[in-house]
Amino acid sequence: MNKIKKMEFFKFKPIGVIKTPFTKIPPPYQPPESGSGNFKVILFPEYKDGLFLLDRFKYIYLIYFLNKSRDFTLSVKPPWTDKKVGLFSSRSPRRINPIGLSVVKIKKIAENIIYTSPIDVYDETPLLDIKPYIKDLDSKEDANYGWLEETKDLDHLLLHIKGIPH
């Protein structure tokens, strides 16, 4: 039988920073794709060649370090519902390992800068990786809403989750 070794630490090397207008106020939950503000990813110059052909994709995943996240609990109450759920059943930024993941739309790429749709992170968030979002691989037609389907007004709740003013 294999023994799983408990690892205490991993090292990650930032490859850039995410620039947003959220310096003092908390970022919104799931900002709308068409929101306003200046959102960009600045890749460190030594990684610029890694952007080759990325502009052929419409969306990308950004993987980042939630450097302002301080603690976590295993039971959370998402801000847009009264229901308590397990941490792993939520998108809370307060994680055991403070790693964030977002899908953003590429507006343009210039040199080592990717201009994107809004992203819900603080300004100067350390970027760990970028991966292309590929239509048939990353879109699951049979995906569902999980425990959200048990809420009273799912349609109204989805407006909050998506950050759509109503």
Image: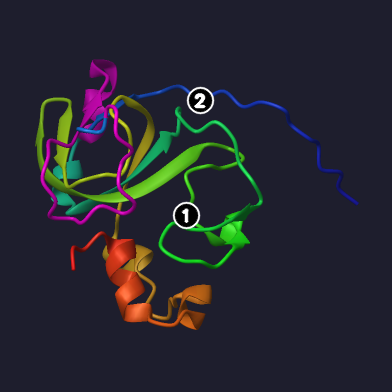
Between 73 and 43, the residue placed more toward the observer is: 73
On the image, numbered disc 2 is attached to which residue?
12
Between 34 and 105, the residue placed more toward the observer is: 34
Provide the major secondary structure of the magenta segment. Answer: loop
In percent of width and height, residue 141 lies at 37, 79
In percent of width and height, residue 62 lies at 34, 42
Q: Residue at x 33, y 71 (%)?
A: 158
Q: Residue at x 17, y 25 (%)?
A: 112
Between 48 and 84, the residue placed more toward the observer is: 84
Asked if residue 112 lies in the magenta stretch, the reply is: no
How many neighbours does mark 2 have within 10 angstroms: few (below 14), some (14-19), or many (20 or more)?
Answer: few
Q: Is residue 18 placed above or below 138 in the rendered structure?
A: above
Q: Which residues are magenta?
A: 23-51
Tag 1, which secondary structure? loop
In the rendered image, the quadrant that contains the C terminus is: bottom left
Amino acid identity at mark 2: Phe
Q: Is residue 89 left or right of residue 116?
A: right
